[in-house]
Amino acid sequence: MNISGQTKVFAVLGHPIRHSLSPAMHNASLRALGLDAVYTAFDVRPDRLMRVLPAMADMGFGGVNLTAPLKEAAFAGLKDLDDSARRLGAVNTVEFRPDGIKGHNTDDRGFLTAIEEAFAIAPAGRSIFVLGCGGAGRAVALACAIRGARRLLLADLREERAGRLADEIRALAPAVEIVPLPPDPAQWTASCPEAELVVQATPVGMKRDDASLLASAAFRSEHRVLDLVYPYSETAFMKAARQAGARTANGLSMLLHQGAYAFTIWTGKQADVTAMRTALEKAVCERME
């Protein structure tokens, strides 16, 4: 594409950011729609974020995605937040408006679309095991609670984090049964079969040689298992679940759909999801070579 002084620039910010596949999918959609725009990535430390965002607004950026560890920093620093960002306590999409900067969160919608696409299910009435109660896991658990999950089992190596999330959910959705588990993989293995949907929301799996946090004994054939890690087509966690007969999916679909919702916020246009998916799948294959 030809880049000129009129080309609109979008970006993803994180620390680190080299692993991000967001540029691949967003540039594919921009090209497919024939927009004079480009999407890139910048490494920004959390303590600099609230200086960087106003500067980007002044420079005419079209919009920004945020990834770890910047989502909570943006939530704390931005005054104008949409309902989803306020509810989740994090911002993953920044909109530069004429009247200021607004923070959004599309992670919950991306997750809900991903499980519908992969497994044809919704959280309502289901028992769900969430492994990892930090940023992504917290968004998933809150989205499930709000959408009527019957029971949530929360697991994290940091017991206090699972406890805080349990308290949040009880205040937000008191009808949901909450079971915070101790930071003990053996207990996780014993409790996991009680769930119908299992979500792996820790960073474990981002490295090729990362072992699964749960063994195959934790899974059953009726399980639907979503690993939010996306750089590889199958993680060790997914492999352990598949060996037990479970249906599995990685985080590529959630990444895709949260990005598509962000694209619409910035441009007012429906993203070309097919082009985005093709670009993501190609990027993952290239990374595995």
Image (spheres, rainbow, N blue to C red):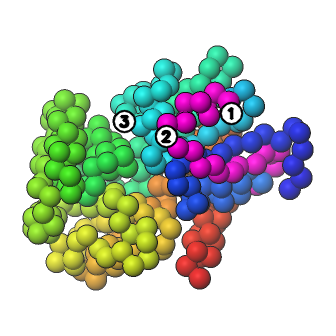
In the image, residue 288 above or below residue 251: below
- Residue 199 image position (x, y, % from top left): 30, 59
Residue that label 3 marks? 88
Observer-side mark, 2 or 1, equals 2
Q: Which stretch did the figure color magenta?
A: 32-56
First reached walking from the N terminus: tag 3 or tag 1? 1
The Cα atoms of the two marked residues, 3 and 1, are separated by 24 Å
Q: Is residue 177 left or right of residue 73?
A: left
Q: Say if the magenta span includes residue 42.
A: yes
The Cα atoms of the two marked residues, 2 and 3, are separated by 18 Å
Observer-side mark, 3 or 1, equals 1
Circle 2 packing at 10 Å, graded few (<14), some (14-19), many (20+), is some
The Cα atoms of the two marked residues, 2 and 1, are separated by 15 Å
Helix, strand or loop at disc 3? helix
Circle 3 packing at 10 Å, graded few (<14), some (14-19), many (20+), is many
Which amino acid type corresponds to the residue marked 2 in the rendered image?
Pro
The residue sitting at 65% across, 37% down in the picture is 63
Residue that label 2 marks? 46
Which image quarter is the C terminus in?
A: bottom right
Observer-side mark, 2 or 3, equals 2
Which amino acid type corresponds to the residue marked 1 in the rendered image?
Met
